[in-house]
Amino acid sequence: MDVVTLGETMVLFTPETTGLMRYARNYSAKVAGAESNTAIGLARLGYESGWISRLGNDEFGKMVLSFIRGEGVDTKSVHFDSSAPTALYFKEKLTSNETRVHYYRKNSAASQMLPNDLNEDYIAQAKYLHITGITPALSQSCYDTVMKGIEFAKKHQVQIVFDPNVRKKLWSEEEAKRVLLEISGKADIILPGLNEGEFLLDEKDPKKLVKKFYELGPSVVVLKLGSRGAYCLSDHEEGHVDGYPIRNVVDPVGAGDGFAAGLLSGYLDGLSLKKAVKRGNAVGAMVTEVDGDFEGLPEKDRLKSFMNGTSKDDVIR
Ligand code: KDG
């Protein structure tokens, strides 16, 4: 296994119309979860990824499992829980560039995850353990599960990749700061966004912010700057990596998960930090051009033509 990840995946309902959701009548049902988005991104690019989670033993849980398995992600470590439901999430498009999310995930099956759900061997055989700040926000037992995953990863020299993914709707700001900084200090690679960094470390300047994260302990810090690209720092490299021009942003949600998939795929191919970041920027940009949290994730050939600037505004016949 190249990358193993751990977290909740929900059924995502998106209204077919823009505006307040109270007026929406028709919805499309999709699947979304930051960690499984990254696992799908890696599978599409040809890498071996696995996802650890719990799902409700219900129709939505079955839908999520067959979908993620169908994308080529290993789901051996996903358990069905008959005592709690699969979580739901609604994405309300208020205007063409303003989105609001609504979670129905309290006491969901995934929020009941326990450290005992983790199989040490499953984590030990991976090169990277990917975690996000969403999972510890779900419950105390999810926090404990993340900590156990970190312990297993450290024991077996599995690199820990952490995306803080701040979700203020899930917990208090104080708790979020405390836990996300604690995990940042245990990770090998961290991938905060600029606003997240400012929230966590009270610093706006990318260069200073990256340095502050680096001083917490990780050997690689990549600060995502949206369409402006990213600023990165490691033991060997530092600098800004430009983003890609995006022709039409349809849906920015999921770009960070795509970034993680692109960056990790670069590392798995032995690329330098800046080249891996460049690939992360490209995958993140491609995700924003398509509706849905992961539908825009590319396969290798499309990623290559996007990065070479040879993808065309054309009809493919
Ligand atoms: O990163 C995109 C995620 O926010 C989305 O897919 C849903 O996992 C999700 C969450 O908790 O918001």
Image (spheres, helix red, strand yellow):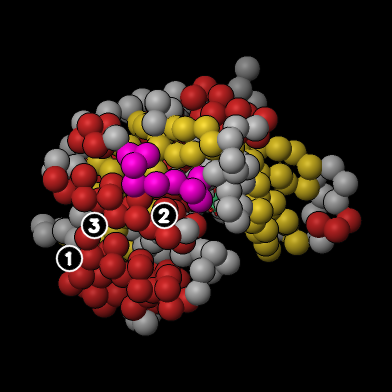
Q: What residue sits 85% from the left and 51% below the top?
A: 24
Say which amino acid is labelled 2: Ser
Q: Earlier in the sequence, mark 1 or mark 2?
A: 2
Q: What residue sits 27% from the left and 32% below the top?
A: 122
Q: Which residue is mark 2?
A: 141
In the depicted structure, whether residue 136 falls above or below residue 54: below
Q: Quadrant of the N terminus?
A: top left
Kindly tell me whether residue 300 is visible in this rendering: no
Q: Determine whether the residue tagged by mark 3 lies in a helix, strand or loop.
A: loop
x then y, percent, for residue 155 = 14, 45
Q: Which residue is mark 3?
A: 187
State which region is magenta: 110-118
In the depicted structure, whether residue 202 falls above or below residue 311: below
Q: What residue sits 82% from the left and 49% below the top?
A: 17
Given residues 149 and 28, the one toward you in this image is 149
Say which amino acid is labelled 1: Gly
Quadrant of res 43: top left
Given residues 257 and 83, the one toward you in this image is 83
Given residues 124 and 307, the one toward you in this image is 124
Given residues 106 and 32, the one toward you in this image is 106
